[in-house]
Image: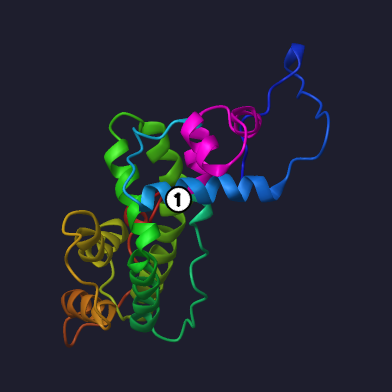
Amino acid sequence: MSGTGTGAAPGGRPAERRGRPRSAAVDTTVVETVLRLLEEGVTVGELSMERIAREAGVGKATVYRRWADKEALLLDVLRSLDDACPELAGASVRDDLVALLEFLRRRVLAKRSSAVMRAVIAHVQTQPKLWREYHDTVVAARRQAFHAVLLRGAATGEIRPGLDAELLTDLFVSPMLSRVMLHEWRELPDGLAEQIVDTVLQGVRPQEGTAARGGPSRGNAPGPA
């Protein structure tokens, strides 16, 4: 948790902490309270620091000592849902892509993660900073994992060289995200990751009789997601 509510002393020096050390248990209680409220259908706009404090059973001052405002708290709520990408075997590009998509499928199957994601998307137009922070701390790392696998696939001949890694990542990830964000009633069944990967790979494999000649051009190398 970042707890961005800490102030600064005159002259720009960090303010010294006074009193008892910050309680991790209180941090967890407040974050879990926000997650529960979002899961129950409370919108981001309906959340207030006062309501969060009341629902968490702590004082409003306790919350403000940890987070300067609701946006700072929501960033820590998003970070609390972040898991590291799975360790990839590296033997097969196809298997590694399936592992990454299956990781995504299992995450969004969790009601809590889906509820928070939808709440943030609904809130993004009025709070772009929140979306940018979520993108920079969560989304970018996952896209870089896809980029690395795709570049390896181009180098080994499993994927045609010269294709745009950014576009390919979108082709693999978008079907899953579409079901979560636009058609939340659609199921995410077992085997969906394999189906998506095999369908896309069918179109990006080298044509029969051609050999791979290295990875994508420098202009197509993945940059910041």
- Image location (x, y in percent) of residue 177: 25, 60
Instruction: Let me know if residue 169 is in the magenta part.
Output: no
Name the amino acid, label 1: Leu
| Residue identifier under label 1 | 35
Instruction: Let me know if residue 60 is in the magenta part.
Output: yes
Q: Is residue 15 above or below residue 221?
A: above
Tell me if 30 is positioned left or right of 65 in this view: left
Q: Residue at x 39, y 58 (%)?
A: 113
One can see residue 65 in this view: yes
Q: Residue at x 64, y 34 (%)?
A: 66
Q: Secondary structure at mark 1?
A: helix
Predominant secondary structure, magenta span:
helix
- Image location (x, y in percent) of residue 47: 40, 35
Query: What segment is highlighted magenta in the picture?
Result: 50-77
Instruction: Judge by depth and name the residue closer to the eye, 211 or 177.
Output: 177
Tell me if 199 is positioned left or right of 78 in this view: left
Structure colour scheme: rainbow
